[in-house]
Each structure stands twice: as structure tokens, then as C-alpha cells.
Image (cartoon, helix red, strand yellow):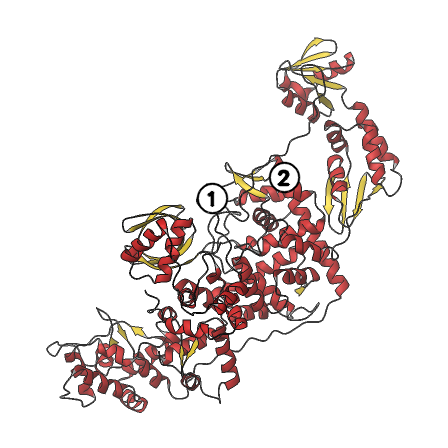
Amino acid sequence: MTGKGRNTDGLAGWLASLSNGELTELLRARPDVLLAPEPPSFTELADRLGTPYSVREAMATLSEAGVRLVEAICAVGAKASTRQVHELLGGPDVLPAQRLTDELAGLRRLALVWPTGARLAMPGSLRAMLPNPLSLGRPASELLGALTVEQLQRIGARYGLQGLPRKAAWVAEIGAAISEPDTVRRLLAAAAPEVRELVEQVAWHGPQVGGVFLPSQHQRVPPGHRGVEVALYGWVVPAQWGSVGEMPREVALAVRGRDHHPTLPPQPPLPTGQRLDPDQLLATSRSAAGASVDGVSRLLALLGRTPLSTVQTGGVGVRELRRAAKELRAREHEVRLWLETAAAAGLVTVQDGELLPTVDVDAWTGVEPASALATLLVAWWELAVTPTHRVDEAGKQQPAVGGRAVEVGATRLRADLLGTLAGLGESTPPSDFDAVIDQLAWRRPLAYGNAELLGPFAVATRAEARAFGLIADDALTPLGAALLDSAGAAGPAAALDSAGAADRATGRASARAGGPAAALAEKIADLLPRPTRTATFLPDLTAIVAGSAAVELAALLDGCADAESRDVASTWRFGPASVRRALDAGQTADRLLGELAAVADKPLPQPLTYLVNDVARRHGQLRVRPVTACVCVPDPALAAEVARHRSLAALSLVALADTVLASSKSVPETLAALRAAGYAPVGHDATGAPVLERAAARRAKPTRRGQRRPLSSAPPPPPGVSPEELAARLVACPSNDPPIRSVGGAGGRAAAAIRAAARQLSAGEVELLASAIEDCLPVHIDYLSASGGLTSRVVHPLDLEQHRLVAWCELHDDERNFVLGRIAAVSPAES
């Protein structure tokens, strides 16, 4: 398909007439055209804006009213004017002229419609996407023109037509007859009931129907056959081989009646509830955010000790998720959210079938809570999936961090949801969340589907936003407002969507250290309580920390006590096993008590001091040395007791001396058995030196943030130009149509080869594909397979072999060959 075939020549001229500000606004709304290599002229920009991929992306941002208006323009035809479209929609009595003007302005901002003289033009690829706008078929002239003269004569006989000289005359006369509403309704009123029923059904729910055909003059058919009757009157015209017919657009409008007019659905109302207490809202937000950061921290610690295994199809299955939830005392959907967010932030990756923390974890756990939370929020904001509702076509929950899932545009949904709540006002929730879902479905029907399909994803997104403290009681919190502002649009969600998409396309809004996360951390630092650096130690052997514990305080308590709860206040409990764990890691009683006293808000209670000293006194009384294992006991009586202990029978202890016992098990097994029996042994090496049991946490090399698996060895594409920069370059260009920049060397030869083998591609697409081959850049292609199916995919071109493109295909995760003649469209691939 050439640029001319996409109806972009007029678009280039219209683009050149825009001011710098108008062009910048358009480019912000269509960020896919900004990707490298940037278009050097209005002609190539128009060509990119007209590609099917780019048009689909733009259509996905339209509201239900915008989609209906596009259909109305397509239904009027290629020569549609604003007046004709307004008449189809009922005129000023049904649709106020100002609303039509506003809706058309929205389409112009997206370059889906532009003025050409008195008519409204649109990309040819957009018309191809809507072959049956408003459930209306093609014009009568087009359908009748595909019939034979003999078939036209049989239809004309019903209208008293005969002896016309040429086929064109038959088409014109019959078209005029079936386009006259009064004639259609008069003849239809006299038809059999079953014929009227079929015509009305196709008129409202068509435009195609089976069982329709025009018999030849000598073919016998049963009298009153409704499929033949509707064809003989031209109400449904045979349009394909077999018996499939299509109702002409004029007939459908006549049957629907003069009073029927498609309407532009209004935006659903969003009733508000009672305004909430801002202080309470902030407190709830802080608590939820702190709990999420703590949950991710505990999850990372668990993965460092016992990684989660992945299933064969990829990702972490339900069994492993439930195991992690049980160990973390959390719910399965919380673990899913923590895992997906941590993976998107580069803190977790899959290696050798296991989910492991990356080396970035140590740096993340050492930062202040605001920075840690900001990293998670930016990663969650850009996730392409809804972690807690990752389902397949049947609605079955899929593994976390991998596998395929049905999605509804998760990134856009987060922006729209938070932006919608922001529009209600500070601390003001909606009175009914179903109304929010209805409004979101109206705002993006092509992206979200209807409210029923969107509902589960919207509810899951709301729960995830609550978990991070962005929403509380369905009202946007200060944390949520800060995230919106950091994303570049604190106003309406539509603006946020376009600005956020533009920033993502130019590499300005990705979860990278020192980027948006750092800026967001500055915004939310004052919204979060300062980390608590002291603890209250109670006689019941618990330690309580109000608020969020500082990193070093949490590390100290985690090393010598067991965490029981972490909420507004966090609780740790000391016990013999937890104190022994600290001593096993190299602590001494005096040093441990000194460190605890340094962080205590008052003197340590006696029970805690007694516990530490008592465990320390018994710690090391039993020393385990390898024989296979050798147990050294200072007291012969204690040695005899250990040797006779029933639960230690599996060790097959043998007395080598009064104070030495030999074990048949290894040192770790012997230590574990003795501890299970109630003793506190310490391992020693062959020289007799104590062995510190400080387990090293496992780490993996981080992958590119948000990437589940390597796709190819090609380097990541460079960021595209900003909307302001490209607009300034194009407006400043002395010619609206400069020559397309040439690709020298191998790229020039590639362009020539592509041009010769793929004549359906425009000059801009040839240039783009040749540049991608030369610079190893990924591109998005629409490809027509041998079976006739059209697929969209991102490929990484590697080379040209005669008339074939050799490329790594992300869809199949494999190297594939693509016939150049079957590539229907080429556009930049979003990084």
C-alpha cells in the first residue's frame, strides 16, 4: 500500500499548515511517529500517521463518542462534509453544533480527520478498518457495479426499467430507485412478512447475510423464497461467491427511517461521595505504602534463601505462590503484585528455572523508604500487565512473572483510573465504583471493551493502587496525586495518557535509577513519615517500632528476633532460637545487648537481658567437628545424656571418649538434629575454629528492566526525538517536502532491493526498513502470511536474502524469513 493509497498526500499539506504549537500537540498525541529514525519531512510524517499500526494506536485513545463520529464520517463516504455528517447525526435538534465542533477538533488533534476544502478527509487505512461503519454496508453503486448486466436487468424489471444501453446506466437507474426511501418502504410494506423480517434484521444488524442469490433466467426456485426476493429488489445484493449478500447503505438507511439518527453517546455521570478526612486519608495511605515496601523486602529476603521455581511454560505457578504466601504470612494476590513489581524494577529475575533477587537488591534495601517506594511505584506504573488479574481467554489465573495473558492496556488503565479519581477533587471518592468502570469503558472502548470486560481489570487495578497507598476508600491520596504529577499530567487522564505515552516513546519515563524514580522520591519524601530509629523493648520479650523502621534498625531486629506483624507499628519477638541465630552469625552477648540498648528508647527489660545471657551461656557447649561429624562435650554426664537421647538415634552416636561422640551424619545434619532435640551446638572446622553460619543470599545478574527474557542480540533502539524538537525542525524546514534522506552503503543497496521486491510499501516505509537493517533497529510490521492471515509483530532485521527479510521475530521468539512482497506496512517499534 503506497502513501498515496493511504490518502496521506492531503494530510502532508494540512500538517504543513499547522502552527508550531498545534503540530507539537499532535505529535504528543501520536508518540509512535517519534521513534528513531524520526521523519525528516511532512510527507514522511503523513505517511507514518497513515500506517495501520499508527492509526490503530490513535483509535485506541478515542472515546465512545469519538469512535461513533469516525464511523459516521465513514458512513457518509469519501466526500463527507461537516454538514452531511451533522445531518446524519440528526442535525442541531439532536446534536448541538458546538459539541460536533469539539468532537471534530479532537479527531483533528489526532490527525484521524483533517479538512480538505469543504470535505473531511481521513487516512485510507482508517476506512479499511471500518468496512461497515454503523453496521452499514457499501454504497449501492459499488455493490451493483459488481453484478452482470443480466443480473442488473432482473433487478431493474422489478422497478419497470428496460432497454438501457450500457451497464453504467443500469447501475445508475437501479441505484437511484433503491436509494429513494419512500420507494423502498412502499415496496417493503407489500412484501411477504418473512421478507420484511429479513430486510429489517439486515438493516439494523447487517450488513451481510447468507442465503441470498440471484437466479438465472432459466433457474427454477421456489416461489416466495425470501433470499431471492430481497435480491431481486436489490435490497440485498449478492456480494461474494456462494450465497452471501450485502445490503446497500442507502437501503439500510431507508429501512431505519428518517427519524433514526446515530447518536454520540454522552459521558456517563460520575456521582461523588462524602469528602473524607485528609489526615485520615494520608495515614491510611502511609500504612499501605509501608506495608508494600516491607512485603517486597521480605519477599526478596525469602528469594535469597529459597528461590521460587518456575513452571515449564514460564513464570511462577500457583503452588510456589502459595508457598511464598504462607511463609510471608501474606495473601496470594499480594505476592503476585510484589513479584511482578519487583521484576519490573529489576530486583528479581529468572535464572536456571528459579526466581532470584538481582544484585540491585542490596542497593535498594539500603535506601530510605521514599526512594524504595518510588522505585516500586514507577515500575508498577509501567507494567504491561495487571499482576493480580493475569488471566487467559477462559479467565483462568496464569503464572506470575511470565507466560501469556489477556490484557486491556494495563498502563493506560492505571493512568485513566487515577486521573478519573483526581478529577473528583481532593479527598473525594466516587459514590459508586461501577460508575467509574462505566466512564472508563466509555473513554476507551477500543482499548478496554465494554464495562463487563473491563470490570475485573479495573477492580484489580484499584486493589493494586490501594496496596501502594495511591487510593484509600476509593479517593485519590496525596501519594497518588504525586505519582500523577510525576508522570507529567496531574490533570485529566486523557492528557496523562498522551503525555505519558510520549515520554515513554522518547525514553523519558522508564523505571531507571536516577530518573523518574528519583524525581518521584523527592515529591513523596514529605508525605511519608520519617524512619523510626528507636524501638520499645517490653518485658514480654517483644520489641515494638512505631511507624516505619529505619533500614539499620530493621536489619538488627531481623537478625535476633522474629517479625510478627508490620503495620502502623511493627512487632518483633525474641526467643531462644532467634537469639541463637544471632550468636550463630558471630554476635556475642555483650555486643548484641549493647547494640539493642543503643536503639532502645528506655533501658532494656531484665527478661531480655536474661534471655540473651542464658542462650549465650549455653551457646557453644556442644561443638560439632567433622569425623563424618564429631560432637565434643565438656561434661561426661552431658555426653552420656546426648548419646542416650532417643531423638538422636538417627545420628548413630558413638562415644570416642568421655567427652567425644562420633556421628554417622554430616556436620549440617548433626547440627540440625541436635538443635531439634533442644541443644544449642556450634559448628567448628577441622582446626577447631567456630564456623559462623551467616547464610549468603543468592543473587542473579539483573536483566533489562521489565524484560522477561532476551529477545535478540540486537542493541536496544535509541530514544526518539521529542515532540517539541520534531515540530520545530519540520516547521523551520524551508520546503514542506524535502527529499527523503538517503541511506548510503549497505543501507542504500537494501533500500533498492526492498523497493524492487515490495512495491506495496511507501517510500517512507522502504527508508524505515532499510535503516532498520543497517542500524539493527526493531520495526513493527503488518505481515500477510501464506494462509492469508494478517498479523502484527515486532521484528529485529538481520539481513536481506534475495526477496526475503531475515529477522528475529518477537512474536515467535525465533529467527524467521519474511517475504518482502507480503509485508503490508512498516512502522517504528516502540522501545
Q: Residue at x 68, y 50 (%)?
A: 371
**Mark 1 sits on what residue?**
710
Q: Residue at x 35, y 67 (%)?
A: 3
Q: Residue furthest left?
A: 218
332 with respect to 742 (left or right)? right
Q: Residue at x 55, y 60 (%)?
A: 503
* Amino acid bearing label 2: Leu
- Locate residue 423: give its quadrant: bottom right
Q: Nearer the viewer, mark 2 or mark 1?
A: 1
Position in image of residue 191 (x %, y %): 26, 86
User: What is the distance, in whole Å, between disc 2 and disc 1 at their CAs?
Assistant: 26 Å
- Locate residue 458: give its quadrant: bottom right
Of 383 and 705, nearer the camera is 705
* Amino acid bearing label 1: Pro
Q: Residue furthest front?
A: 734
Q: Is residue 156 above or below residue 371?
A: below
Q: Dot 1 lies on which element?
A: loop
Query: Which of the numbered marks, if any, corresponds to residue 302?
Result: 2
